Image (tube, rainbow, N blue to C red):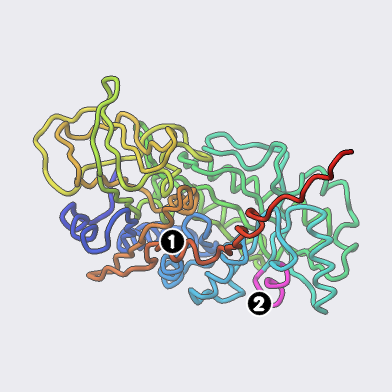
Amino acid sequence: MAASGRTPAEVTELAARFGTPLYLYDGDVLTAQFRGLRDRLDPAIDIYYSLKANPNVSVCGLLHTLGAKAEVSSLTELRTALTARVAPQDILFLGPGKSREEIVECLTQGVRAIICESFGELELIDDVARDLGTTAKVVLRVNPSFTVKGSGLTMGGKPRQFGIDEAQLLADPTLASRFGAVALMGVQAYMGTRILTEETIVENTRRIFDLAERVAAFLGFDLELVDVGGGLGVAYFERERDLDVEVLTETLNPVIAAFAAAHPGTSLAMELGRYLVATCGTYVTRVRFVKESMDERFAVADGGTNHHMAAVGIGSFVKRNFPMRLVNRVSLAENVPWNVTGPLCTPNDTIGKAVALPEDLVPGDLVAVDRSGAYGVTASPVHFLSHGYPAEVLLHGDEALLVRRRDRVEDLLGPQVFHDLSAEVSRPEPASPVSL
């Protein structure tokens, strides 16, 4: 598995300049990953960057300059995409628990479509659109009756909070006509994530196209957009391999081309998050102490699961180590098992269990966790023990750009409101009545 394209000496210099813990995002690796797929994928399908994987505005901005559109799932993600200069018509908004405020913003901004995930949400969208005097463009997220094998995390085909069951939609022929302020215009299905077999992605796409045709025909609306989800994975662990883009597109492109030819007025979308950004990221943490406990070695570092919960098994991950390495020096010592832990007061704060690192690991050494560009800080309890966010740096050509500064104490205390209750606490208790 390839690491970020920067040398250990460069990583060490950046850690000295920006401090640790630190996330580094290599723009060259990010660009190569995007273009490696985009240049081979049938041009009929657009790539939408899923901000949930890494919501940094500069990461989103770089991908947008390369040609990516945006898929968002919160008001802040929507504003992030807009700040990154993604046009509203190039944004899809999804998520199972949308608020009225989010729907208002979508309709006011004029996003490409709201991806609806329940009948109750459809009623809310219709209500908001009526209040605004507009018509909401809505794509139905369908929970298909079929499942997919080969996914690290299954997202459809079973009882799920995501989407509307296919059987429920195909039992309601009047759905498209019941909501006067809603224009149904597409179908989306997302079957799973971390898919590492090309055949699974192709079969997924074929079946979603078929599903979209059936749902649109039954409900009687024109297919303006079909979103095939995505779920393309990257290899993290031993005995895993990255997708072969040549093999994938060789079999996927004919499926896309055939559907596009049959539906010339239909836009096609693929959502990609992890696949685009995972390989460009490196999490750098500095060893503060080394110790032994009951014959096991521990390297206690300045950052851990508060910044990189994915490394210990969250969501689609199983508990295996991400690729880790010593970067600040060359050691000739034998590699031995080390438990790499962070600063939190919990035994769960272990980002690497029995990691092969040099026996002579010492305080001050830098440990880099590779392939950390997706679901790192964004899926971690960054406020546990009030350590806050680490710095984030985007490497763009010869420049190292600070794209998020490290949280300061003032940043964490600022939103809190202190009420001095000492007067209440010290007030004397009223005297008890005297019994006669």
Q: Is residue 93 above or below residue 131?
A: above
Residue corresponding to mark 2: 109
Quadrant assignment for the N terminus: top left
**Which residue carries the number 1 mark?**
38
Locate residue 101 relative to residue 325 in the image: left or right.
Answer: right
**Classed neighbour count for the residue bearing mark 1: other residues with Cα under 10 Å, few (<14), some (14–19), many (≥20):** some
Q: Is residue 41 magenta?
A: no
Q: Earlier in the sequence, mark 1 or mark 2?
A: 1
Along the horizontal axis of the image, is 8 left or right of 108?
Answer: left
What is the quadrant of the C terminus in the image?
A: top right
Residue type, label 2: Gln
Extreme residue in the left direction: 332
- Residue at 59 percent across and 44 percent down: it is 204
Between residues 93 and 254, which one lies in front from this camera angle? 93
Q: Can residue 262 be seen?
A: yes
**361 vs 133, nearest the viewer:** 361
In-image side of 276 versus 154 (left or right) = left
Could you say where residue 253 lies in the image, as x and y percent from the top left?
A: 51, 54
Q: Which residues are magenta?
A: 103-112
Q: Residue furthest top?
A: 294
Compared across the picture, whether 47 is left or right of 207 comes to left
**Residue 430 on image: x %, y %:** 76, 51
Instruction: Tell me the element at label 1.
Output: helix
| Quadrant in which residue 433 is drawn | top right
Q: Is residue 249 visible?
A: no
Please state which amino acid type lies under the numbered disc 1: Arg
| Relative depth, front residue between 210 and 108 | 108
